[in-house]
Image: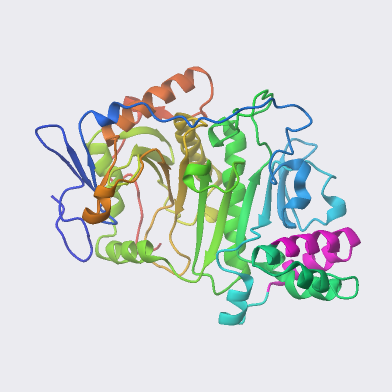
C-alpha cells in the first residue's frame, strides 16, 4: 500500500476494487480521486453528430484557416517540414511570402495569433528581445510588400479582437503609418513563445465527405513520426530562443469538445516562466523516490495487467486516477530530454502515441498532453505523453466531493484499446516493432534512470 506523505498525495492504493465491482482510483502523482461504477463502462462512446457536405478539390484545402490554400490566414511561418526531391524529410526555416509556394509543407510551425503569454509579457517582465534568427526572419519578411500586407492583416485581426475600434485601426494601418505600426508590433509574430504545429491535411487523402477528418491516427505511422519530431524541434527552439523560459508546455486538442478552436490537426507549444504546480509536486516526489515512475506508474500498471502495447524504447498502458479515460505512453530512454534522444527512441514514443490515436478513432475528442523534465531541473523525470478521451461529462456530484466519475475503468479501457489495435495490425496500420497484449514482455524497473548522472 502506498502511504500518504508530502511526497505522495495518494492516501490509498491507486486502484481498489470493492466487492460490488466499484473501482476507486487515486492518481499517485496528483492525488485526483476517481470512481468507476459497475455497468457504466460498457456504454458505447458517443459519436458527435454533424451535418456533412461533399469534399472536392475546390474545398479540400480551404475549409479552415489552417488549410494549405489559406497560408496567409495564419501568422508568418517560423518553419516547415517538407519531403525533398530525394524523399528525405527536411526543415526549412524563415520563409518569406514569396517562398511559401515553392514547396509543399507536410507540417508548418507558426506563431499563435492569440498567445497565452504574449511577447509583451516577456519583454516587460524580463527585458526579453527576440534572438538574431527571428530578427533576421522578420527583416527579410517585411522587405517584401506582400509580407508587410500579410503582417498588417494579422495585426489588424489581433487588435480588432482586443476591442480596438475600426477607426483607430484605419489610422494605425494608414499608408503613412503602416510600416511603423508593423515594425513596432510584428515581433510578437516572429519572436514569441507560443507556436502552433499544423498538419497539411484537413481531410484524409481521397476523402469525399466532410466527416472524414484527418486525425493523428489517420496519418501513416512514418508521417506521424515526423509530426512528433517536428514538434520536438519546436520545443527545443523555444527553449533556445528565450533564456527566461522554464518549461515548454506541449499539447494537442482534437475536436471541439476537447477545447479545439479549429478542428484541423495541430499541436501547440507554449513557453512559460514557471514549472507549473503539477511539475513542482512531481519534482518534490521524485527527489524523495527517484524510482517512483516505475513503482507508481509502469510497474503498477504491469502488476495490474494494464499494459496493452510496448516496443524496445517505450511502453503504453491504461492510466488510472484520471478524470477521463486515459492512455499513457512512457519513454524508457535514460535520456529525459526528447530533443536529445536518439531517433529510434523518439520514434518509439511516436509509434505508441500513434497506436493510441488509432484505437480512439477520428471521432473521439481527446487531449494529448506531453510531460518532460523542465530544463533547469536535475532529477530523473521521463518523457511521457498522455491521451485523454473527452467522453465523460462533468457531473454536479464532482463539484462538492472532488471525486470524479469516469465511466470506463482502466481494465475495460485496456480491453477496448487492445481489441482495436489487434484489428489495426491486421490492416497494416501499426508501426513495426510494436508488441501487443501478452506479447509485451514488461520488465520491472524498465524505466532505467540513473539520478547520479542525469
Pinpoint residue 54: horizontal percent, then vertical percent.
69, 25
Residue under the image location 57 percent in, 74 percent down? 243
Nearest the eye: 428 or 249? 249
Q: Is residue 150 left or right of residue 207?
A: right
Q: Is residue 73 left or right of residue 292?
A: right
Pinpoint residue 403: horizontal percent, then vertical percent.
23, 50
- Residue placed furthest toward the left: 19
Quadrant occupied by the C terminus: bottom left
Is 132 colored magenta in this rendering? yes
Residue under the image location 62 percent in, 58 percent down? 195
Residue under the image location 49 percent in, 32 percent down? 48
Nearest the eye: 325 or 403? 403
Residue 384 in view of the camera: yes
- Residue placed furthest toward the top: 426
Nearest the eye: 45 or 104? 45
Is the stretch drawn in magenta largely helix, strand or loop? helix
In the image, the segment drawn in magenta is 130-157
Is 240 colored magenta in this rendering? no
Residue 213 higher or lower than 387, as above or below: above
- Colouring: rainbow
Residue 236 higher or lower than 198, as above or below: below
Residue under the image location 21 percent in, 35 percent down? 37
Residue 441 in view of the camera: no
Residue 429 higher or lower than 4, as above or below: above
Pinpoint residue 204: horizontal percent, then vertical percent.
64, 29
Residue 111 higher or lower than 108, as above or below: below
Amino acid at each position: 500500500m502506498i502511504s500518504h506523505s508530502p511526497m505522495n498525495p495518494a492516501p490509498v492504493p491507486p486502484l481498489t476494487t470493492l466487492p460490488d465491482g466499484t473501482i476507486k482510483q487515486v492518481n499517485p502523482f496528483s492525488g485526483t480521486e476517481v470512481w468507476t461504477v459497475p455497468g457504466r463502462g460498457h456504454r458505447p462512446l458517443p459519436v458527435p453528430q454533424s451535418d456533412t457536405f461533399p469534399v472536392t478539390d475546390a474545398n479540400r484545402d480551404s475549409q479552415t484557416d489552417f488549410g494549405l490554400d489559406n497560408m496567409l490566414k495564419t501568422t508568418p511561418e517560423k518553419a516547415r517540414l517538407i519531403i525533398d526531391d530525394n524523399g528525405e524529410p527536411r526543415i526549412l526555416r524563415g520563409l518569406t511570402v514569396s517562398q511559401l509556394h515553392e514547396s509543399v509543407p507536410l507540417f508548418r510551425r507558426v506563431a499563435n495569433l492569440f498567445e497565452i503569454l504574449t511577447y509583451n509579457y516577456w519583454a516587460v517582465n524580463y527585458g526579453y528581445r527576440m534572438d538574431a534568427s527571428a530578427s533576421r526572419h522578420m527583416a527579410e519578411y517585411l522587405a517584401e510588400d506582400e509580407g508587410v500586407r500579410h503582417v498588417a492583416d494579422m495585426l489588424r485581426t489581433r487588435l480588432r479582437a482586443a476591442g480596438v475600434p475600426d477607426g483607430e485601426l484605419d489610422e494605425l494601418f494608414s499608408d503613412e503609418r503602416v510600416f511603423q505600426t508593423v515594425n513596432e508590433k510584428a515581433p510578437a509574430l516572429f519572436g514569441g513563445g507560443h507556436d502552433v504545429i499544423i498538419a497539411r491535411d484537413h481531410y484524409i487523402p481521397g476523402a469525399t465527405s466532410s466527416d472524414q477528418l484527418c486525425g493523428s491516427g489517420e496519418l501513416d505511422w512514418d508521417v506521424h513520426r515526423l509530426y512528433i519530431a517536428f514538434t520536438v524541434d519546436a520545443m527545443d527552439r523555444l527553449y533556445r530562443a528565450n533564456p527566461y523560459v522554464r518549461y515548454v508546455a506541449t499539447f494537442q486538442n482534437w475536436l471541439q469538445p476537447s477545447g479545439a478552436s479549429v478542428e484541423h490537426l495541430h499541436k501547440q507549444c507554449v513557453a512559460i516562466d514557471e514549472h507549473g504546480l503539477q511539475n513542482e509536486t512531481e519534482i518534490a516526489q521524485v527527489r524523495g523516490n527517484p524510482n517512483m515512475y516505475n513503482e507508481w506508474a509502469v510497474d503498477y500498471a504491469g502488476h495490474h495487467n494494464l499494459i496493452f502495447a510496448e516496443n524496445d524504447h517505450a511502453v503504453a498502458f491504461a492510466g488510472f486516477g484520471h478524470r477521463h479515460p486515459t492512455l499513457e505512453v512512457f519513454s524508457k530512454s535514460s535520456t529525459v530530454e526528447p530533443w536529445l534522444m536518439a531517433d529510434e527512441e523518439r520514434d518509439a514514443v511516436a509509434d505508441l502515441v500513434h497506436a493510441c490515436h488509432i484505437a480512439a478513432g477520428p471521432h473521439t475528442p481527446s487531449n494529448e498532453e506531453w510531460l518532460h523534465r523542465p530544463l533547469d531541473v536535475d532529477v530523473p523525470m521521463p518523457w511521457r505523453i498522455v491521451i485523454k478521451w473527452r467522453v465523460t461529462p462533468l457531473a454536479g456530484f464532482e463539484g462538492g466531493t472532488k471525486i470524479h466519475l469516469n465511466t470506463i475503468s482502466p481494465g475495460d479501457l485496456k480491453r477496448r484499446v487492445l481489441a482495436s489495435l489487434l484489428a489495426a495490425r491486421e490492416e497494416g496500420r501499426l508501426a513495426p516493432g510494436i508488441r501487443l497484449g501478452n506479447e509485451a514482455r514488461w520488465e520491472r524497473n524498465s524505466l532505467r534512470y540513473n539520478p547520479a548522472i542525469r
